[in-house]
Image (cartoon, rainbow, N blue to C red):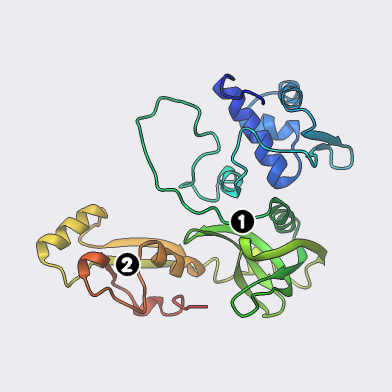
Amino acid sequence: MTDTTSLPWDTQARYRLIEILALWEGRVTASQIGAVFGIGRQQSQKIIRQYRELVPNSLLYDESKKGFVPTEDFRPLFTLGRVEEYLHLQGANHELESPFAGLSLGAANTESLPMPNREISPRVVREIVKAARQGIRLEVNYASFSNPEGEDRVLVPHTLVFAAGRWHVRAFCEKHQQYRDFVLSRFRDVPEPCGTMLGKHDGTQDGEWHTQVEVRLIPDRRLPEVERSLIAHDYAMANGELVLTCRGPLVLYALRELGLNPQHSEVNPRAQQVEIANREELTRWIRWD
């Protein structure tokens, strides 16, 4: 088995990038390596060559794609093979663990709770990313509570989103003629391209997505003043209020992240701690599917 721990940390970081791009985009090029690490083409090509020598039968050059593609035997050694690594690389969510973490940089001891890793196929992500970049439609089979066995749909995706512990894709649904969120782990089979958009249905037309909404939070008013002051300090509130701004379709997810149920208040105010101050203003966005 290849020993990866003895390699310099910068070499490991570059190999991690190679694996992330190969796994989730299905192609890696010297120009991508050079752009991320600020190095020349020859050095980038050398890095890819050294990776292929270290991990034989992992990547093959595809003339039609002008880059290296993963083989059937490809197995990541320097990454966990989780979609979070790729989406963090794209800057989708700055709270995620960096794909370059774990390089023994001497940080203080830390610990975090393990979270379930939802099953997301790299092949599904590749097709969604490609469709979003090229503005093409996808035929998909999508499972939901109303259709647990899966239902054929045509989607036009535009943005990958991490919210409420799950990865979604924001896309225009031709069946419902509106933009909706689709959970990545619920796609059945690999989406298939089915031509360019019928009309203008890319992300620029998603009005709700481009609407910025303020969520105003205050300490639960059922608590004594001294406890409300403590909570205000915990959340770094200004004048007893915290204002969060997010995209309209993400309001409900933001409240879930905070442990707030708009349709139910905890009996014990200490369990809830904060409450929504502008509840009526959020009515348009607070809806349960």
- Can residue 20 be seen in this snapshot? yes
Q: Is residue 237 above or below residue 181?
A: above
Looking at the image, residue 191 sits to the left or right of residue 89; the answer is right
Counting residues from the N terminus, which is met first, the one under dot 1 or under dot 2? Answer: 1
Q: CA distance from mark 1 to mark 2?
A: 34 Å
Check disc 2 and give the amino acid type.
Arg
- Can residue 273 be seen in this snapshot? no
Q: Quadrant of residue 208?
A: bottom right
Residue 200, position as x, y percentages in the image: 72, 70
Residue 229, position as x, y percentages in the image: 15, 59
Residue at image coords 21%, 58%: 232
Residue 137, position as x, y percentages in the image: 77, 66
Q: Secondary structure at mark 2?
A: strand
Tell me if label 1 and label 2 are in contact, CB under 8 Å.
no
Looking at the image, residue 14 sits to the left or right of residue 199; the answer is left
Residue at image coords 57%, 19%: 6
Judged from this view, the residue extending furthest toward the right is 63
Question: Which numbered tag is attached to residue 216?
Answer: 2
Residue 70 vs residue 255, the one in the foreground: 70
Q: Secondary structure at mark 1?
A: loop
Q: Quadrant of residue 32?
A: top right
Residue at image coords 84%, 42%: 65
Label total for image: 2
Quadrant of the image for the N terminus?
A: top right
Looking at the image, residue 117 sits to the left or right of residue 108; the answer is right
Q: Is residue 221 above or below residue 4?
A: below
| Closer mark to the observer between disc 1 and disc 2 | 1
Residue at image coords 44%, 68%: 251
Give the crowd class for mark 1: few <14, some 14-19, many >=20 residues within 10 Å: few
Judged from this view, the residue extending furthest toward the front is 1
Residue beneath disc 1: 119
Check disc 1 and give the amino acid type.
Glu
